[in-house]
Structure formats: structure tokens, C-alpha cells
Image (spheres, helix red, strand yellow):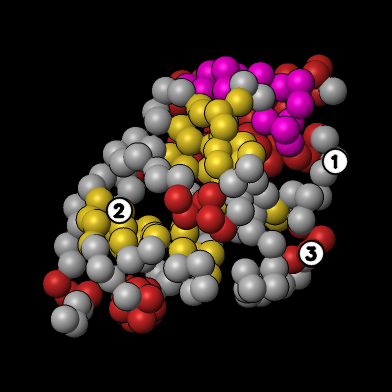
């Protein structure tokens, strides 16, 4: 069966799951959709997921990612944010497009690279998923070996750390020891919706400095 892009319509905030999708079909759909698209496409062992985010989803993603960048800057840790870059492995039959992702301890390994190849390059060290309209499945991230996955459901931030090939929910991020981020980040996110982005970032930066 051949599936064409014009056959697929996914409203914002909804997701489409397709089963028995071959890797070749996934690659063809990815090419047909192109890079300039508003949807996220994930693949895991024959299951294809297409999701179109809501505007609030994108707002939360940007603010939380900016807060992470402030943390890394103030801690003087080199990093690279690759947004919703497609990470895929044909041998593992997995492909993910996170809402945002960061290379932190492995930043030097991919510094300056225009293409990431998971057969030779490490996966991101931290991935961020906004789960307002759908629930992120762990499979892709676990199999690809992403060490840390944050999930925000609109009110709560969940920090998951990979241990023995499975995610374990933690109170604290191993990248930011001593920072109660699951409590603080949602607070600053809400604050940004009242006070604005710049004022919130300045306040958060000041808070981070008091914790260092």
C-alpha cells in the first residue's frame, strides 16, 4: 500500500498513529513532508506517529528551552540546542523529533557538525517533550539511549533519567544537581505568561546565580 502526503490530515493538537509502516515508507513520508513543516514525525518498530502541536505547546517549549539555556550559560557549560532535529537509526528501527534537545556533555563530539549520524554520533543528552495533547512514549528515547527526558504536561515537569535501559522518574536532574527544577520551571513558565518573556528570564537568571 502506498501512502501519500495529500491523504494525511492531522488537526492541531491531534496525533495520528499508523501501524505496519516499513522503514522505507517512513523515509518516503519524511521526504514528502519536507523539513519546513509544523508536524512532528516519530517512528518506533513499525509504528509511525504524526503529531501537530497547538500554539500553547510551542509557547511552553520555547520558554522551557530558554530557561535551560540560562541554566547552562550561568553554569558555564558548553551546549548545543538542536530543536526538533530528526534523530533516526535504521538498525534500531527508531526515529524521534523531540520538541527540543540538548547536547551537553557530548557537545564537543558534535560541535560544528551539520548532520548527526547516530551510527557514529552520540544521541542528545537531554530531550524535552511538551505533552499537552498527547503522551510521549518512552520507546524511542530509551532505545536510542537519550540519557535524560523531560516531559511537561501543561502544569507539571517530569524528569526521567535512563538507568539500565529504562527511564526512572527523579526529583532532580543529574545535569543540574541542587536545582529544584520540577518545581521551579513551571512557576517561571506561568510567570512569563503574566510578566513577559524578558522580565521572566532576567528573574530566573538572578535566581540561578543565588543557587550557584
Q: CA distance from mark 3 to mark 1?
A: 18 Å
Q: Which residue is mark 3?
A: 109
Which of 109 and 188 lies nearest the eye of the viewer?
109
Q: Please name whichever residue, 86 or 139, is drawn nearer the observer in this view of the structure.
A: 139
Q: Is residue 140 left or right of residue 77?
A: left
- Taking the spot 47% from the left edge, 54% from the top edge, the residue there is 140
Q: Nearer the viewer, mark 3 or mark 2?
A: 3
Q: Residue furthest front?
A: 164
Disc ID at residue 76: 1
Q: Which of the two labelled residues, at mark 1 and mark 2, occupies the earlier sequence position?
A: 2
Query: Does dot 3 land on a helix, a strand or a loop?
Result: helix
Point out the frontmost of discs 3 and 1.
Answer: 3
- The secondary structure type at the circle numbered 1 is loop
Locate the C terminus by quadrant: top right
Residue 102 visible in the shown view: no
Position of residue 12 relative to residue 122, above or below, is above
Tell me how far mark 3 sits from mark 2, CA to CA.
32 Å
Image disc number at residue 52: 2
Q: How many marks?
A: 3
The structure residue drawn at horizontal position 82% and vertical position 44%, both measured from the top left corner, is 77
User: Can residue 184 be seen at all in this image of the molecule?
Assistant: yes
CA–CA distance between discs 1 and 2? Answer: 35 Å
Instruction: Tell me if residue 187 comes above or below residue 31 in the rendering.
Output: above
Residue 87: x and y, percent?
53, 64
Rendered view: 56 above or below 5: above
Magenta-highlighted residues: 173-190
Q: Earlier in the sequence, mark 3 or mark 1?
A: 1
- Is 184 in the magenta? yes
Q: Position of residue 94 (x, y in %)?
A: 46, 64
Percent across and percent down for residue 125 are 67, 49
Amino acid at each position: 500500500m502506498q501512502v501519500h502526503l495529500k491523504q494525511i490530515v492531522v488537526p492541531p493538537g491531534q496525533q495520528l498513529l499508523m501501524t505496519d509502516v516499513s522503514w522505507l515508507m517512513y523515509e518516503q513520508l519524511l521526504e514528502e513532508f519536507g523539513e519546513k513543516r509544523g508536524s512532528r514525525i516519530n517512528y518506533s518498530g513499525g509504528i509511525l506517529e504524526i503529531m501537530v502541536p497547538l500554539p500553547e505547546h510551542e509557547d511552553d517549549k520555547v520558554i522551557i528551552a530558554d530557561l535551560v539555556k540560562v541554566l547552562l550559560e550561568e553554569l558555564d557549560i558548553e551546549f548545543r540546542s538542536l530543536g526538533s532535529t530528526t534523530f533516526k537509526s535504521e538498525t534500531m528501527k527508531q526515529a524521534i523529533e523531540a520538541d527540543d534537545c540538548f547536547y551537553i556533555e557530548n557537545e564537543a563530539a558534535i560541535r560544528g557538525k551539520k548532520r548527526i549520524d547516530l551510527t557514529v554520533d552520540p544521541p542528545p543528552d537531554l530531550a524535552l517533550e511538551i505533552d499537552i495533547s498527547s503522551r510521549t512514549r518512552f520507546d524511542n528515547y530509551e532505545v536510542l539511549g537519550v540519557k535524560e527526558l523531560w516531559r511537561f504536561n501543561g502544569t507539571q515537569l517530569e524528569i526521567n533519567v535512563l538507568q539500565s535501559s529504562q527511564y526512572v522518574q527523579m526529583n532532580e536532574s543529574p545535569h543540574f544537581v541542587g536545582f529544584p527544577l520540577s518545581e521551579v520551571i513551571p512557576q517561571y513558565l506561568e510567570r512569563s505568561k503574566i510578566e513577559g518573556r524578558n522580565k521572566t528570564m532576567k528573574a530566573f537568571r538572578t535566581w540561578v546565580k543565588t543557587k550557584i
